[in-house]
Image (tube, helix red, strand yellow):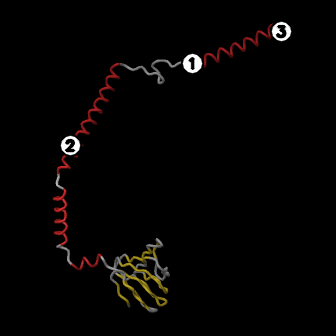
Amino acid sequence: MRRKGYLIIISCLLLVIICQLYTSANANSVNPGTIGDPIVTKSYVDEQMEILKNIISQQQSNTQTNNNVNNEIKDVDMASIYAYIDAYIQSSLTGVNEESKSTSTQKFEILNLDVGAKLICSESTEVILRSGTATAIANEAGIGISDLTGGKDLGMGVAIPKNHLLLIPRNDGRGILIKEKAWIMVKGEHTVK
């Protein structure tokens, strides 16, 4: 019985060793024609070499073209180009009337308004409440004025925060109502009622 037991143990060990050797041999060897070692034909290699040659020749021709363009640009008289651009700008400005020039450089107007005064603004008018208190006046549809600093819409009767840039989007009766004597900065068309 002892001999039979030893024989079984030795057989099991040999079986484990053979399996281990077979597994490691298959892992290290790559069969030709598989993904690990693909078979490549001469025609495939020739085709890839032709594609590579075309790419290289295109890059060389692009480099030569760029060098030719750079040489042509160097030959251009830049002073004449600047003179042409200056003349074009001057001729464009002669058609602009003085009134439109002044509106593009318009400055903020400072207003001191008493309690109950209404500042009604046209479209694109900018307003900043510097001191005092005021509330928003919305249009008939209830749409208020844009608080650009706060990133929100101020509806009818909402308190206007100090030092926030307000924008009146349309000429439809929107503005601000003064609740406590206030200093206002305004840029754009407006009326005080």
Q: Give the amino acid at mark 2.
A: Asn
Mark 1 nearby-residue class (10 Å; few <14, some 14–19, many ≥20): few
Look at the numbered disc 1 and give the secondary structure of its residue: helix
In the displayed structure, would residue 61 be above or below residue 15?
below
Q: In the image shown, does 122 or 57 lie closer to the viewer? A: 57
Q: Name the N-terminal-most of marks 1 and 3.
A: 3
Q: Residue 72 in the image: state x and y as whole percent.
A: 18, 47
Q: Give the amino acid at mark 3.
A: Arg
Residue position marked by numbered label 1 in the rendering:
26
Callout 1 touching callout 3 (CB < 8 Å): no
Callout 3 touching callout 2 (CB < 8 Å): no
Q: CA distance from mark 1 to mark 3?
A: 37 Å
Mark 3 nearby-residue class (10 Å; few <14, some 14–19, many ≥20): few
Residue position marked by numbered label 3 in the rendering:
2
Q: Residue 152 in the image: state x and y as whole percent.
A: 47, 72
Residue 167 visible to the viewer: yes
In the displayed structure, would residue 167 be above or below residue 47?
below
Look at the numbered disc 2 and give the secondary structure of its residue: helix
The count of marks equals 3
Q: CA distance from mark 2 to mark 1?
A: 59 Å
Q: Quadrant of the N terminus?
A: top right
Mark 2 nearby-residue class (10 Å; few <14, some 14–19, many ≥20): few
Residue 143 visible to the viewer: no
In the displayed structure, would residue 97 be above or below residue 70?
below
Residue position marked by numbered label 2 in the rendering:
68
Residue 105's image quarter? bottom left
Q: Give the amino acid at mark 1.
A: Asn
Q: In the image shown, does 177 or 36 lie closer to the viewer? A: 36
Residue 106, numbered label: none
